[in-house]
């Protein structure tokens, strides 16, 4: 059985490393908060992330059956329509997911 001090040392090292790895991005970005690059990324990155998530979601669509492709298309149209209309990402994603799951459960 390992010594209690050894276990405490391991837990302390793991906690310190976890804290350091979580704090590192904030410390590295602090000097760049007012840079033009960070401002540009803060404007365009959310759209880029959403596009990547959408492409990842529909990557298996060609292998799906006709009905599944139709449900996916309807869910995408609902998501895009809500986003264009309300400009609320959480609402759009949630509604599109609910529509897709509901339609898939019907087939």
Image (cartoon, grey):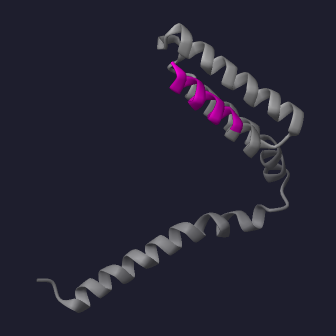
Please indicate, yes or no, whether residue 18 appears anywhere in the rendered image: yes
Q: In the image, is residue 51 part of the stretch drawn in magenta?
A: no
Helix, strand or loop: magenta stretch? helix
Q: Is residue 82 above or below residue 58?
A: below
Q: Is residue 20 above or below residue 55?
A: below
Residue at image location 51% in from the left, 74% down from the top: 19
Q: Quadrant of residue 90?
A: top right
Depth check: give the residue in front, 71 or 52. 71
Q: Can you give x and y, in whole percent of width and height, for residue 13 in the image?
A: 38, 79
Q: Can you give x and y, in whole percent of width and height, for residue 79 in the image?
A: 74, 30
Q: In the image, is residue 101 part of the stretch drawn in magenta?
A: yes
Q: Can you give x and y, in whole percent of width and height, for residue 43 in the image?
A: 83, 45
User: Which segment did they paint magenta?
Assistant: 95-107
Residue at image location 34% in from the left, 80% down from the top: 11
Depth check: give the residue in front, 65 or 40. 65
Q: Can you give x and y, in whole percent of width and height, for residue 83 in the image?
A: 81, 34
Q: Is residue 2 above or below residue 99?
A: below
Tag count in the figure? Answer: 0
In the displayed orientation, state which residue is furthest to the right: 85
Residue at image location 43% in from the left, 77% down from the top: 15
Classify residue 30 as left or right of residue 3. Answer: right
Q: Is residue 53 above or below residue 103?
A: below
In the displayed orientation, state which residue is furthest to the front: 106
Task: Name the quarter where the N terminus is drawn.
Answer: bottom left
């Amino acid at each position: 059985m390992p010594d209690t001090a050894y276990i405490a040392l391991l837990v302390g090292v793991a906690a310190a490393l976890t804290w350091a790895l979580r704090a590192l991005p904030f410390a590295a970005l602090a000097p760049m908060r007012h840079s033009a690059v960070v401002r540009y990324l803060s404007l365009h990155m959310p759209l880029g992330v959403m596009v990547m998530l959408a492409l990842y979601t529909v990557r298996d669509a060609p292998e799906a059956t006709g009905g599944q492709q139709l449900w996916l298309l309807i869910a995408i149209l609902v998501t895009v329509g809500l986003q264009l209309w309300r400009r609320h990402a959480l609402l759009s994603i949630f509604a599109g997911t609910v529509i897709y799951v509901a339609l898939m459960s019907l087939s």
